[in-house]
Image: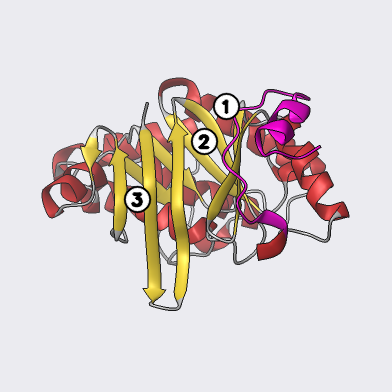
Amino acid sequence: MQVLAEGVEFAYSEKSKVIDGITWTVRSGVTGLVGEKGSGKTTLLSLIVTLKQPQQGRLIVGGYDVGGVPGRRAARRLVGFVPQQYTLAGELTVADTVSYCAWVSGVRRGRCEAAAERALAAVGLDGHGRRRVGSLSADDRRLVGFAAALAHDPEILVLDGPADGLDEDRRAGLGAIVSRLAADRAVILSASDPADVAGMCADVGVLADGRMLFQGTPTGAAELWAERALRGGFGTDAGAGVPVSRAEGSDRAGAERSRGEP
């Protein structure tokens, strides 16, 4: 497994526990993380990519315990991160942008150009290296961000909201790219709706109020999502006390019985 969280907690203040005892497993391939705005998705991803430190519990990333400084430093080299919002310098060329990111991520200076070429080819931007970033379409700039995160060849790629704002055709194109990238690494995608990652993931975690409500198939996640929508959403009362389930597909009844519901 690439990521293992056991009872992980994080709070910005004593009265604001954003991550509340999360237990979650991420293996190679594509894993989705779905939750409404404010559910804790970005904070959880920030913990995984070592921008924040768990305050309770255990978090293993790429085989390293990131609860301590040595583990965080080691894990950081294994992770690539594309945040939900980021800015690229429009006056730089695509190749220079990705090459610089490779260097920042620890690639030796003499190998950065080749690393950038490989990363750009991986996202379908080979041949774009000499273009200015500012001349690209919004979709291609998004792919430059992907390439920048791939430049040091990470074992784990974390994409925060990559499908936000995309129509069905563009989501399909994103899915094809993600599938290629996941051939030899773990990819984590976050989204605010299961539909945004449908067809991309074999495994999906559903997050609400800082708690992992479900981990299983996309179908199971979509069923839970629809059920909770009928109950009024994913507020604290709706999701309180619901454990993670490994329910597969439509086996939601078994998951409900495990919670003691009729």
Disc 2 to disc 1: CB gap under 8 Å: no
Which of pointers 3 and 2 lies earlier in the amino acid sequence? 3
Residue sitting at x 14%, y 54%: 69
Is 44 magenta? The answer is no
| Relative depth, front residue between 112 and 213 | 213
Instruction: Give the structural element (helix, strand or loop) at label 3.
Output: loop
In the drawing, does residue 41 fall left or right of residue 76? right
| Numbered circle sitting on residue 49 | 3
Residue with the most extreme left position: 70
Name the quadrant containing residue 55.
bottom left
Residue 63: image x %, image y %?
24, 32
Quadrant where the image shows the C terminus = top right
| Numbered circle sitting on residue 14 | none
Which of pointers 2 and 1 lies earlier in the amino acid sequence? 2
The magenta-colored residue range is: 238-262
| Relative depth, front residue between 196 and 221 | 221
In the drawing, does residue 127 fall left or right of residue 119? right
User: Which residue matches tag 2?
Assistant: 123
Instruction: Give the structural element (helix, strand or loop) at label 2.
Output: loop
Between marks 1 and 3, how big is the CA–CA gap?
Answer: 21 Å
